[in-house]
Image: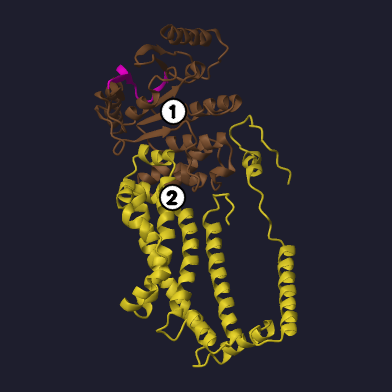
Chain colours: A yellow, B brown
Amino acid sequence: MAVPATAPERDDAAAPTAADVTETAALKRPRVKKSVSTWLWNIAVLIVTLGLWQVATALVGSPFFPGPVAIARAFVDLVQAGDTSGITLWEHAWASITRVMVGFALAILFGVPLGIFMGLYPRTYENSRVILEPFRFIPPIAWIPLAIIFFSGMPRFAFLIFLGAFFPIFTAAMVGVARVEPIHRKVGLVFGASKSWIIRHIVLPTILPDILGGMRVGLGAAWLTIVAAELAGGISTGLGRMMVNYAELVQIPQVVVGMLLIGAIGFLMNEALLLLEKRLFRWRWQVTL
Amino acid sequence: MAMAGDLISDSGNSSAAAAPKLRVDESHCYGDFLVHEGIRFDVRENEFLCVCGPSGCGKTTLLDILSGNMKPTQGSVKLDGHEINPRRDRVSFVFQEPSTLPWLTVRDNVSTGLRIRRTDAAERDRQVDAIIGMVGLKGFEDHYPHQISGGMKQRVAIARAFVIDADLILMDEPFVSLDQPTRERMQREVLDVWERRRRTVIFVTHNIEEAVFLGDRIIVLSTKPARIVADIAIPLDRPRDPLSTDFIALRTQCSEKLHAMQA
């Protein structure tokens, strides 16, 4: 469609034309279209990679270097028969996912309101920086020893994942509040809105994209933490646990199945959040990463 | 019965018309720096008043004080006899800069003031539909601000200001960032809306031609500190012709006042 760079203003006021609408369309950043050919290319790259990998495996011929076929066989085996104690791959995966979800939900529950609060009252943040900031730099993995002593089961994982996901969400919400346009606040004020109306209808919509961005970072951190926490032991389920079990048995295909599944689940969760972002923020034309 | 009722409400109206809708009497300083000195004027109900002054005449401060969002150091702004209060009174505002909320559609932007006042949904829709037709945004209700032009965004802001049953509408140079043809069209449109939805309007502008074209009356302010140097009635019929001799005479008169105090 031919879109003029600037649409001329019309003479009659009563009936705006499509020209007004398309005027800004030219300003939008071009997006790479996910066309059929992109899909075909991805599939082709995947097939070629797997083929090369299989060939390389055959050439090496070592049990320490399994190919796609051996890994696929291990996958089917883990899905159908389960691991050495009969726990299936889906049960392991589900255990990890629920832990991440619980910890992640807690991080949102605390991170968003606290971030908004400290964004609205920057002094509270400035005055407690001395505590907040160092905490941010203790990696969640460094909390594992303490978590092992104090908690077991779900609370332990929820705690560790909370620590991993909290700060990205909290920081995103807080920084977002500072970016609320003064004019938007003023619109609320001059029309007589209460403080709570402004928070709900001006601040929250403004920072929602930031929060979602923070959630995607937080989800990465949570997923990273869960595997490390499960490696630490004390439980029989979870993808991390399964991988350690098989590593001890030197059964590499099963370990790789765990790795690939972790990658796939993380990827799908991220895609789900991206999709949510696109749906919610049609009014934004920013390209997401 | 109806006649008696009409008579009573008529006499009520005429006595209300005698008292000013808005009575401004204020002086304001920031620390030792006097910005407004004895700003005193009345605004009649449904009057279109233009306030004209050079840059640095304390225009932003005046609007903050008029909207009730700032207390003057001395004196007060009274609406219907009581001190103006943005939470209680219905004051709307059309800003100079784009002020549409980008996450809301045209329809939701226009209804902002109604939603703040908790108008019920059916009534809200009815009013929003009416005003959207009036400012020529029909068919664009579900568009987001980034999909429409600057002139249309300002129409959204005007609709948002006129849709509520406002006691006072403040306009802060709303057309200054628009190109000349759009600006002229928007001036005609805002008068059109005002004639259909009579409200008390205070329109601040640097542009004398705009003020003479729009206002029932013009107040000319001086600078540092701001004082009222002229209060000129514009008795011309609308629509006004900027090329008519009467128009030019009034414009010249305002210009001279403005330049006299700058010299």
Measured as percent of width and height from the top left, residue B52 is found at 43, 18
Direction from residue A80 to residue A68 in the image, left or right: right
Amino acid type at mark 2: Gly
**Under tag 2, what secondary structure?**
helix
Look at the numbered discs 2 and 1 and tell me whether their residues touch, using CB distance below 8 Å: no
Whether residue B25 is visible: no
**Under tag 1, what secondary structure?**
strand
Measured as percent of width and height from the top left, residue B158 is found at 47, 34
Q: Quadrant of residue A274?
A: bottom right
Q: Quadrant of residue B82?
A: top left
Q: Residue at x 73, y 43 (%)?
A: A2
Task: Find the magenta span and give its range.
Answer: B32-51
Q: Residue at x 61, y 85 (%)?
A: A253
The chain to which mark 1 is attached is: B
Which secondary structure dominates the residues rendered in magenta? Answer: strand
Residue B186 magenta-highlighted: no
Q: On screen, A94 above or below A28?
A: below
Of the pair B216 and A4, the residue shown nearer to us: A4
Amino acid type at mark 1: Asp
Foreground mark, 2 or 1, reads 2
Q: On screen, A199 above or below B88?
A: below
Question: Marks 2 and 1, how far apart in space?
Answer: 28 Å
Of the pair B3 and A101, the residue shown nearer to us: A101
Which residue in the structure is indicated by mark 1? B172
Which residue in the structure is indicated by mark 2? A176
Measured as percent of width and height from the top left, residue A280 is found at 51, 56
Residues indicated by labels 2 and 1 sit on the same polypeptide chain:
no
Direction from residue A129 to residue A244 in the image, left or right: right
Whether residue A128 is visible: yes
